Amino acid sequence: MKRRKFIVNSSLGIMATLPALDQLAALDLPYFTTGIKIGEVGSTSAVVWARLTKEPIRVPDRGKLPKFLYLDEANNEWHDIPYFKSKYKEDRPDRKVKIIMPEGSMVDNLDGAVPGKRGSIHIQYRIKDSSTWQKTKAIEVDESTDFTCQFLLENLSPNTPYEINIIGKKNQASQEISGSFKTAAHIEDAIPVNFMVTTCHEYNDRDLPGDAGFKIFQEMEKLKPDFLVHTGDVLYHDHYAKNLALARWNWQRMNSLRGNIGFYRNTPCYFMKDDHDCWMNDCHPASNNKFMGEFTFQQGVELFRQQVPSSEKPYRTFQWGKDVQIWMFDVREFRKPNEMPDGPDKTIWGAEQINWFKCTYKDSTATFKVLISPTPILGPDRPQKKDNHSNSNFSFEGDMIRNFIAGHPNTFFVCGDRHWQYVSKHAKTGSYEFACGPASNEHAGGWKKEDIYPEHEYLNIVGGFLRIEVGRTETNPIITFSHYSVDGKILFQKKFIANGYLNSLP
């Protein structure tokens, strides 16, 4: 095998022999062991993310993970979480934390670690099968950005497939990894669009062995999506991210899963963030909890922007051709505390985002409008929850959003965050919400399957993903929402023509 091909394959997680790894180490090459990501794709632009690494494979799983003890101030003793759950009913105790590293270990050799490497990165890109490559300027990467960088590709052609080569250099040694994507069509062109929605990727609830990752990536890839929308909880910082170094390690082990790398190389993704991506459960900018140690909410927000392809604003909208436009909302950076009394001053979206949404929604020419939120807007949700627009303590802003789009039958809500799949029809407005469900069956739960509300047209306590297809019959635009299992089987499907709906398939 040629050196370059061997190294690229190694960066995708294919194990090399020990002698070969020793020879590669002597070359001091840079690698792309945490893959690449393509995102924020419009009709004429895209953002490409990359990171240089020291080694061609991640640190294998050997049981080397940090452990944590929390201070019980009543007796000045350190204990683990099971102690607090049994004595105080606390699974995230607001208590000082102590990090216990495995003997002889540091962050760079924990299970799944992928240490970064200084060097430079540039991109070559071209229309698929074209003879002419364009080239970006090189960007130097170092510790300040966790060895990551992002490239904005502009002046692209609409509805056009592109090939990219990302080249990493360290001194005279170089390495490359390839990828591909398709741009959105012009807003006046009626073309079919096929995309997926996912949420809640808990690393410890993976459903494939070792570093293979999650089943849904191979199943989604079979359906050849134009893009994926990840509604947040891309990973969970709660337990391990007690400082910035451990939070970066948390991203390294998720980004180096083979299924993730293979999928994101050739499928664009719009990444949204939720509470667990930022910090801990149900957090907001003013959250304060000793459970997270030295790691802060703001560090989590900045790290998220660093680890995925990003736009200037965390909320944004993209139109894919004449028939569909998506809106993606931020529900963490602008929110007020959950405990604040409800009323006109209490917000999740914030005034700036609300004004942006109302203006862009009114200006939209798309046949179908899909409003994608990390958290539910219609629900129903569990009565004890207090973190989203479908909950009673955010009902003022929730009612404003729901009433704003009431009477628009071509507008749909899609949400993540919930660990079950559902389709609901709001009793007052008639609007529909589709919850995509978590990435794996192992992470499903939080709702009883027999607890069916009048709003539910579909309820299933399973993992999987949501597929959304937009196309046309001879005369009418049509949009189809399909819930899939983790094994790629259709569990429920609902189709709408413009200004109405056709059927539901169990």
Image: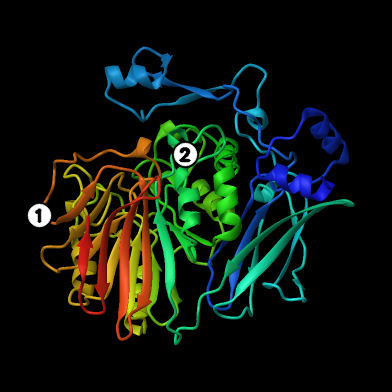
Q: Quadrant of the N terminus?
A: top right
The answer for how far apart the CA atoms under marks 2 and 1 are is 35 Å
Query: Is residue 253 visible to us here?
Result: yes
Q: Residue 308 vs residue 410: left or right?
A: right
The image position of residue 392, as x and y in percent, is 17, 52
Viewer-closest of 460 and 246: 460
> What number is the disc on residue 237?
2
Q: Secondary structure at mark 1?
A: loop
Mark 1 belongs to which amino acid? Answer: Pro
Q: Residue furthest front?
A: 474
- For the C terminus, which image quadrant? bottom left
Q: Residue at x 37, y 30 (%)?
A: 94
Q: Amino acid at mark 2?
A: His
1 relative to 463 in the view: left or right: right
Tag 2 secondary structure: loop
Q: Is 475 placed above or below 176 here?
A: below
x and y percentages locating residue 181 in the rendered image: 59, 66
Q: Label 1: how many residues lie within 10 Å, few (<14), some (14-19) or many (20+)?
A: few
Please state which of residues 465 and 150 is positioned toward the viewer in this rendering: 465
Q: Which residue is mark 1?
A: 454
